[in-house]
Amino acid sequence: MTERPRIALIGNRSSTTPAHACLDAFVPSLDADVDWVPSETVTGPDSLGGYSGLWVIPGSPYASKDGVLLAIRLARETGIPYLGTCGGFQHALIEYARNVLGLSQADDVQYDPQAETPLITALCCSLVGETAPLYLSDGSRLASVFAHAEETVETFHCKYGLNPDYVDLIEQSSLVISGWDAEKAPRAIEIADHPFFIGTLFQPELSSSPGSIHPLIEAFVAAATRHAETSAKATTP
């Protein structure tokens, strides 16, 4: 019998965030038990106990940046499948920069316009309401989601991304940039040796509906299901 996974949608629900209305529409059709988890309620690992998938949804800046970063670190360090879309992509970069690359002051200028290490800054061209080509890194997990295609077209709704000054540093780390735009600006990241850890600036929520779920979301739910099944076996006498 397939174990039904529990998935946490981490963020802050808002009627002004287009992705949230899409989530409300299609999440009930997923083969998973899904809870909305406000960022400010994430105060430690116990806050997310029992979840086999953590998804940081769009909506940055969050009520609790620390709560979001804690959830991402938990997923990264313990192998819980992670999906970060838009704000979840941006904050995955911040968490990794702070806790792996030693950039303790890495931040998003939405929180601190005078950040000492402005890792996340305004895009040179806003992507609010835009569709654009996404070029996929050969051999990446993200490429496998798209049947190993070299490119696809995705929907964006964002104004902030990785500061170009830090691209080289990221590329030299074990964090893989697995999706690029036409100008070679990073649009997706992943951790190769993690069961499932992907962050995307594009929003697969916006191109999903109850009868047509984006393949990245399907892949994430499948990873959460595998994690739930493994966890269940580990606790079975």
Image (tube, rainbow, N blue to C red):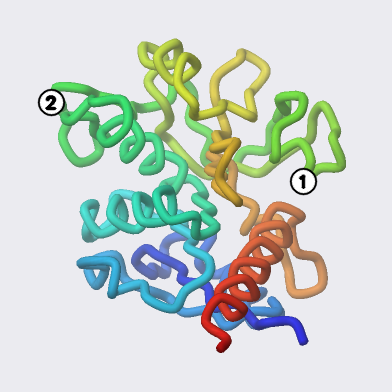
**Residue 117 location (% of width, % of height):** 21, 22
Give SS at disc 1. helix
Residue at which label 2 appears: 114
Q: Residues within 10 Å of mark 1 (few under 14, many from 20)?
A: some
Residue at which label 1 appears: 145
Distance, label 1 to label 2, CA atoms, is: 38 Å
The answer to whether 167 is drawn above or below residue 77 in the figure is: above
Give SS at disc 2. loop
**Residue 64 location (% of width, % of height):** 22, 58
Please tell me which residue is depicted at 84% across the width and 35% down the height of the picture. Answer: 148
Query: Which residue, as the protein is rendered here, is positioned at the far front?
Result: 237
Between 130 and 25, the one nearer to me in the picture: 25
Q: Amino acid at mark 1?
A: Val
Instruction: Name the side, left or right, on which 93 lies relative to 131.
Output: left
Instruction: Name the side, left or right, on which 105 lies relative to 89.
Output: left
**Residue 95 location (% of width, % of height):** 32, 40
The answer to whether 34 is drawn above or below residue 194 in the figure is: below
The quarter holding residue 227 reads: bottom right
